[in-house]
């Protein structure tokens, strides 16, 4: 089974709204990463959070990590139509496996 | 090169044909991953290399799939006797990751879209 599992499977919001996606995992980790994939393209790294960090920011991205619950969330603030993509999480356990992802649609 | 390069970008194979997909990782990257991604799905892990050693091949779906990285740089994913269910995008990624010590950012290629007819 995959190590990182994202939810919801799909999310549709209006431009300017915030988008929150969640990731759950099963085993102990050193760090967790979030990636983005535009249709037909490779994945692009967004942010890495280490197991001793609880929150990290990068531009409009905010990632939290709760190791006690084995979960992470990705918040995209003030979303734009260009944020429309699939978002995946992965941990360093089990050689970087991904879940099915969250398909985010931002309507202009 | 500046990034991970995969070739060919597109491959159409007749059922039963053998195919070879190439991945040129970023120079100096120790770790290399192969994934299979079906339409609308997440990337499914196939195999992982640390330099030339294939440390995990648990994701390879059958013995028709074979991957190698003989000199610790370029890698080839070979699929023998292709079947229609092998149709997918095959993604390669590389990083400075050292297994067991934590990951760094992984860089992905654009993928090879394989269509088996």
Image (spheres, coloured by chain):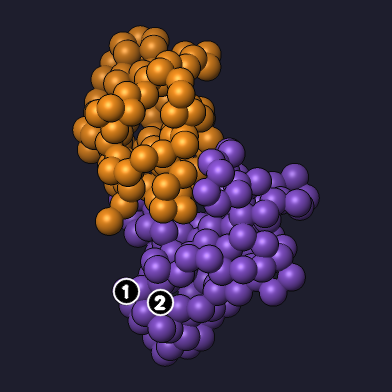
Chain colours: A orange, B purple
- In this rendering, would B4 be left or right of B47? right
The quarter of the displayed image where residue A14 is located: top left
Q: Are there few (<14), some (14-19), or many (20+) residues within 10 Å of tag 1?
A: few
Name above or below for residue B62 compared with residue A68: below
Q: Observer-nearest residue: A10 or A2? A: A2
Q: Position of residue A73 (x, y in %)?
A: 33, 24
Q: Position of residue A55 (x, y in %)?
A: 42, 16
- In this rendering, would B75 be left or right of A82? right
Q: Position of residue B15 (x, y in %)?
A: 39, 86
Residue at 46%, 53% in the rendered image: A95
Chain to which mark 2 belongs: B
Which residue is labeled 1 in the image?
Answer: B85
- In this rendering, would A13 be left or right of B95? left
Name above or below for residue A17 compared with residue A65: above
Q: Are marks 2 and 1 on the same chain?
A: yes
Residue at 37%, 79% in the rendered image: B62
Q: Secondary structure under badge 2?
A: strand
Q: Are there few (<14), some (14-19), or many (20+) residues within 10 Å of tag 2?
A: some
Tell me if I can see residue B84 in this picture.
yes
Name above or below for residue A52 compared with residue A31: above
Residue at 47%, 36% in the rendered image: A30
- Marks 2 and 1, how far apart in space? 8 Å
Q: Do the residues labelled 2 and 1 touch (CB within 8 Å)?
A: yes
Say which mark, if any, is on residue B116: 2
Tell me the quarter of the image containing the C terminus of chain B: bottom left
Q: Secondary structure under badge 1?
A: helix
- In this rendering, would B32 be left or right of A27? right
Q: Position of residue B28 (x, y in %)?
A: 75, 51
- Which tag, 2 or 1, sits closer to the chain's start? 1
Residue at 61%, 60% in the rendered image: B50
């Amino acid at each position: 089974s995959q190590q990182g599992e994202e939810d919801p499977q799909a999310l549709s919001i209006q431009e300017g709204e915030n988008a929150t996606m969640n990731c759950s995992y099963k085993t102990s980790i050193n760090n967790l990463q979030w990636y983005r994939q535009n249709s037909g393209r490779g994945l692009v790294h967004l942010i890495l959070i280490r197991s001793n960090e609880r929150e990290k920011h990068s531009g409009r991205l905010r990632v939290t990590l709760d190791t006690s619950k084995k979960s992470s969330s990705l918040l995209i603030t003030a979303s734009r139509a260009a944020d429309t993509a699939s978002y995946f999480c992965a941990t360093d356990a089990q050689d970087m496996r991904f879940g099915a992802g969250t398909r985010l649609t931002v309507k202009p | 090169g500046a990034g991970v390069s995969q070739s060919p970008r597109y491959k159409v194979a007749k059922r039963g044909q053998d195919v070879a997909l190439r991945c040129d990782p970023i120079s100096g990257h120790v770790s290399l991953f192969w994934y299979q991604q079906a339409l609308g799905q997440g990337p499914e892990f196939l195999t992982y290399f640390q330099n030339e050693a294939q440390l995990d091949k648990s994701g390879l779906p059958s013995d028709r799939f074979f991957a190698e990285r003989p000199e610790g740089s370029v890698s080839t994913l070979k699929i023998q006797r292709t079947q229609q269910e092998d149709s997918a995008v095959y993604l390669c990624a590389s990083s400075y990751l050292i297994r067991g010590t934590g990951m760094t950012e992984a860089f992905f290629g654009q993928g090879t879209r394989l269509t088996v007819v």
